[in-house]
Image (spheres, rainbow, N blue to C red):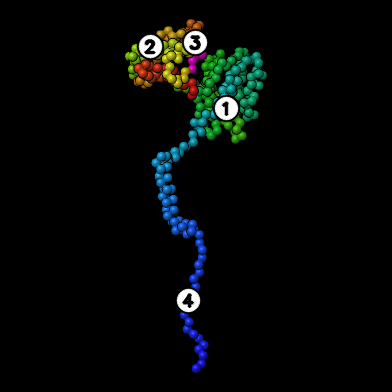
Amino acid sequence: MSPVSNLNVPTHATVTVTARSMWRIRLVRELPRYLLQGLALAGLLASMRFAIDPPRPAIARSPAPASAIVDRSAEGFAALFARRYLTWDSREPEAHRLALAPFVSSSMEDEAGLRLPESGEQQVQWTQVVQSREPAPEEHVYTVAAQTDTAGLLYLTVSVLREPNGRLALAGYPAFVGAPASSVAALPEHQHEVEDPALSTVATRALRNYLDGSESELAADLSVGARVSLPGLTLALESLDSLDWSTPGRSLLAVVHARDQRGAQYTLGYELDVLADAGRWEVSAIQMNPDS
């Protein structure tokens, strides 16, 4: 018998044993649970944040229109020109020409077209811009009130242009105009007279000390934290003519007669903010807020 060349010997799978750290095995097994817990905690924190400080819609603020922007330097330029234009002395025509030279361009007549008379003079006592309009971008036409010693109160329009380089220049010749529309003074209607004698006493005393500049005495009628700025002119309260509520329970309107040290007499109107503290009236403001 011939030898068997191939034997059907059963084969066995190879097993490989690898050592792993216990903490890695635990990490792999517990990782999904940790991730789920982290997401839940993040969601809880986000919910608490929105409950405590909810997001507020952004308020779109449109830029102020160009006509609403006050150009103080241009106003000052117009007022200065008006003062120099209206101030003159026929005996010194060269001084007037030199005063206006910085304003007048080569395309304008000398002295902005003003020809002085053979005699006389005029001084400007004060000027004030009382009106403004914008006929074109970067151009303002100012109405300037000018009080003169000879011609009285005059109103002059001055057109001012802000050039691309930022400099100011006249945009044309000035013009004399009338005063802005106005009406006679009107007292407030439907006022409710103060009927509380204690409040009337406090208001009268506070106004007397306020006008007289008696700061320490005035402090006794002021509320805690009240800020009051005393007037520079010392006045003596002659009488309290009327005391009405401008805002019931909060604000009074007082009309008084007062006299200064020279004997000049004034009728003045003051608004007083008041409040009741423990059954006692106190004054929290008189006419204006010195901090604003």
Amino acid type assigned to the residue bearing label 1 in the image: Ser
Q: Secondary structure at mark 2?
A: helix
Task: State which tag comes first along the sequence, 2 or 4.
Answer: 4
Check disc 3 and give the amino acid type: Thr
Q: Of marks 1 and 2, which one's residue comes earlier in the chain?
A: 1
Q: Is residue 93 magenta?
A: no
Q: Residue at x 63, y 23 (%)?
A: 100
Mark 4 or mark 3, earlier in chain: 4
Using the rendered view, name the quadrant where residue 257 is placed. Answer: top left
Q: Marks 1 and 2: which is nearer the front?
A: 2
Residue in view at x 58 percent, y 25 percent: 77
Residue sitting at x 59%, y 22%:
80
Identify the secondary structure beneath mark 3: loop
What whole-number distance in Å separates the C-alpha atoms at marks 1 and 3? 35 Å
Task: Give the number of the mark in front: 1 or 3.
Answer: 3
| Residue, disc 1 | 73
> Along the line of sight, which residue is nearer the eye, 81 or 30?
30
Q: Which region of the structure is painted magenta?
A: 229-233
Question: Mark 1 near mark 3, Cβ–Cβ under 8 Å?
Answer: no
Residue 234, labelled with which disc?
A: 3
The first of marks 2 and 3 along the sequence is: 2
Q: Residues within 10 Å of mark 4 (few under 14, many from 20)?
A: few
Q: Position of residue 264 (x, y in %)?
A: 48, 7
**Label whose residue precedes the other's in the sequence (1 or 4):** 4
Q: Quadrant of residue 170?
A: top right
What is the CA distance from the residue labelled 2 to the residue labelled 3? 21 Å
Which disc is residue 12 wearing? Answer: 4
Mark 2 highlights which residue?
201
The answer for how far apart the CA atoms under marks 1 and 2 are is 48 Å
Q: Which dot, 4 or 3, sits closer to the camera?
A: 4
Query: Can you tell which of label 2 and label 4 is closer to the viewer?
Result: 4
Q: Of the two numbered discs 1 and 3 on the same chain, state the one appearing first in sequence.
A: 1
